Image: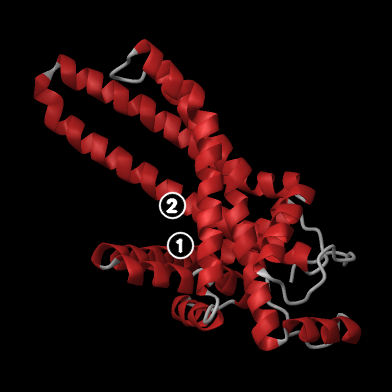
Amino acid sequence: MIRGEAEVSATDIRPMSLGEVLDRTFSLYKNNFLLLAGIMAVPMLLKLAVTIGAEWFTRSAIATAGANPAVRPQYLTTFYLTALGAGLIDFVLRSASQGGTIVAVSEIYLGRKPTVAESYRPVRRKLLRLILLIFVTALVCVLGFIFLIIPGIIILCKTAVVTPVMMLEDEGVGGSLSRSWELTKGFGFQILLIFLLVFVIQWVVGMILLAPVTIAVAVMKLKVIPLGLAVLQHIGQFLTEVLIGPLGTIAFSLMYYNLRVRKEAFDLQHLMTSLEGPAGPSDAPSLA
């Protein structure tokens, strides 16, 4: 567990309806905005710098290839390697931010208030496992959507709490998948509604933040976006990720606890642990 003096929890641990899960998601986000936005901002700032650097490098390569056709094969190789490298860095940073947010939400939910550094501390030990888990989960979901839409939706809902399981229960990849599959049984429709709501919010906010660039491109009738507007576009995406990115992770972290309360009486386990004191055995998820 993250060390720190226990505080009175703002969220009583009990079974919640879908409406209560969503209401507590927004309340927790609002009351801990600086912490949660800070957790997202740390990796997303690095991603922003990498993205802008890759944008500049790619444009320079295009200009060089246009001026000298002989170097076009090298340009294509450089372009694909740059895109692959930027994509890998993006994936790693998103995985880390998701893990850090889950740790922070768990600590807040159980009555503590971590810092950004404390939230990331357990992520360092589990990062490779977390990256593998998210990759495998995404791959399985994509395959489900490619072959048949309905199985893809089912798999998406069944694997909704794989990352909270890994971060809070220290399971492996296979254990996290099977545990999530079991926990979410009977709650697929509620989970699907959370996915849809988060998607709509992210889409709307993203459209608003990117609207100035979109309008500028349309008004000036540009076929190629200038570097300055491209940078503004990346900044808009950065703000969307920092401001809205935590919502989905918060919602599914709370849903994870809600499922444990409903199916495993986690509320009683936590109460008994609290009464036993720090030295007593704990059934609470481990963040170490």
Quadrant (top left, top right, bottom left, bottom right) of the N terminus: bottom right
Instruction: Give above or below for 249 relative to 189.
Output: above
Residue drawn where x is 69% and y is 50% of the image: 36
Q: Is residue 131 visible?
A: yes
Q: Label 1 crowding class (10 Å Cα cut-off): few <14, some 14-19, many 20+?
A: many
Q: Is residue 212 left or right of residue 68?
A: right
Which disc number belongs to residue 33? none
Q: Position of residue 123 (x, y in %)?
A: 59, 62
Label 2 element class: helix
The three-letter code of the residue at mark 2 reads Phe
**Which residue was labeled with disc 2?**
91
Quadrant (top left, top right, bottom left, bottom right) of the C terminus: bottom right
**Which residue was labeled with disc 1?**
131
Residue drawn where x is 51% and y is 37% of the image: 206
Q: Quadrant of residue 70?
A: top left
Q: Quadrant of residue 280?
A: bottom right
Q: Position of residue 277 (x, y in %)?
A: 89, 82
Residue drawn where x is 27% and y is 41% of the image: 81
Q: Is residue 60 left or right of residue 105?
A: left
The number of callouts visible is 2
Q: Earlier in the sequence, mark 1 or mark 2?
A: 2
Q: Is residue 42 visible?
A: no
Does the residue at mark 1 contact the one at mark 2 (Cβ under 8 Å)? yes
The three-letter code of the residue at mark 1 reads Ile
Structural distance between the alpha carbons of marks 1 and 2 = 8 Å
Instruction: Give above or below for 13 relative to 51.
Output: below
Residue drawn where x is 72% and y is 65% of the image: 20
Is residue 52 or residue 253 the one in the foreground? 253
